[in-house]
């Protein structure tokens, strides 16, 4: 009997001007996503992943300490607590990417993983932090992740998380596979231009190399006052063969839903024995400074 799970990826435009108060922006975005999570549940989704820093704009377009106000504790902050209630209500696994406060002044770009009974399973902290022009000043806001590449045993399967810029680094994607991931979710905030062509290249390549499903989430639209470019949406699922299964719209809110047959992973791995044929004894140069 096939082990099929229905997943959902939510991409959403900013619904409150970035010049509004932090609290007003966050409340508006949370309310919007609560409604979209409800829609995903009505369509039978068993797990859902939100976009990077889902309850605000992509504020890394500037360097301004006011955005530190958006930080919350994981799991004790109000947003994760709210999502725990929604997960239990809808019997749905929810991956919640937010701006995390560890200690005052120590902040991470993180994602909480909540099981379908509402229990908090753990978090991933973005490992690779960009800092480049124009408009990606992330080192001003985030400390590099220090929790490694955890994989979470959820009701629907084994889920790993990678966040946005992480996707440019195949080493972590491989670690997630070796740690047992069946589904890897990559919430992102990516604009058109230099790396757009990589959006549908790198992550299917991770899926092929590690023979798991990938869910890639990107926010849509433009965000004033920065206007650093068009967040081009196009969230998608791809299978362990690297084939894109379904793709979202470019410039609007969307809920991208696919049925993932997790038994395909065993079938593909029995055909392409990449994990068997690895040569870790020869890869020392990869971890040299």
Image: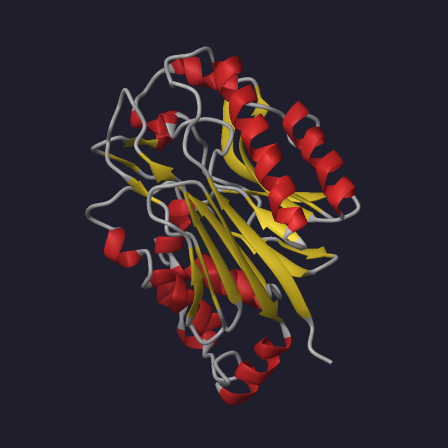
Front residue of 72/219: it is: 219
Q: How is the image coloured?
A: secondary structure
Residue 121 on image: x %, y %: 71, 45
Front residue of 227/33: it is: 33
In the rendered image of this protein, does residue 48 appear above or below residue 60?
A: below
Residue 140 on image: x %, y %: 36, 25
Q: Quadrant of residue 208?
A: bottom left
Is residue 112 visible in the rendered image? The answer is: no
Left or right of residue 30, residue 237 in this image? left
Residue 289 on image: x %, y %: 34, 53
Q: Quadrant of residue 3?
A: bottom right
In the rendered image of this protein, does residue 263 appear above or below residue 207?
A: below
Residue under the image location 36 percent in, 32 percent down: 138
Residue under the image location 40 percent in, 71 percent down: 283
Residue under the image location 26 percent in, 30 percent down: 135
**Which quadrant, please, contains the N terminus?**
bottom right
Residue 180 on image: x %, y %: 62, 66
Left or right of residue 120, residue 159 in this image? left
Left or right of residue 50, residue 123 in this image? right
Left or right of residue 229, residue 190 in this image? right
């Amino acid at each position: 009997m096939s082990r099929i799970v229905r997943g959902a990826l939510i991409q959403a435009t900013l619904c409150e001007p970035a010049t509004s108060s932090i609290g007003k922006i966050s409340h508006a975005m949370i309310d919007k996503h609560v409604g979209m999570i409800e829609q995903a549940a009505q369509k039978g989704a068993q797990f859902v992943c939100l976009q990077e820093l889902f309850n605000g704009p992509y504020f890394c377009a500037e360097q301004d300490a006011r955005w530190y106000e958006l930080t919350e504790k994981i799991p004790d902050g109000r947003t994760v607590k709210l999502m725990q209630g929604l997960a239990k209500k809808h019997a749905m696994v929810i991956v919640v990417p937010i701006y995390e406060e560890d200690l005052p002044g120590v902040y991470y770009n993180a994602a909480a993983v909540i099981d379908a009974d509402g229990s908090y399973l753990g978090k991933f902290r973005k490992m690779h932090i960009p800092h480049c022009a124009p408009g990606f000043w992330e080192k001003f806001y985030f400390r590099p992740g220090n929790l490694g590449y955890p994989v979470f045993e959820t009701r629907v399967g084994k889920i790993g998380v990678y966040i946005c810029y992480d996707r440019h680094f195949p080493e972590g994607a491989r670690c997630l596979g070796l740690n047992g991931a069946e589904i890897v979710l990559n919430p992102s905030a990516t604009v058109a231009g230099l790396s757009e062509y990589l959006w549908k290249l790198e992550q299917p390549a991770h899926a092929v190399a590690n023979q798991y499903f990938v869910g890639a989430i990107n926010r849509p639209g433009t965000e004033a006052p920065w206007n650093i470019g068009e967040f081009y949406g196009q969230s998608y699922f791809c299978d362990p063969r690297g084939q894109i299964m379904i793709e979202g719209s470019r410039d609007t809110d969307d809920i991208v839903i696919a049925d993932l047959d997790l038994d395909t992973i065993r079938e593909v791995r029995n055909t392409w024995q990449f994990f068997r044929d690895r040569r870790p004894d020869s890869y020392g140069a990869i971890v040299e400074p």
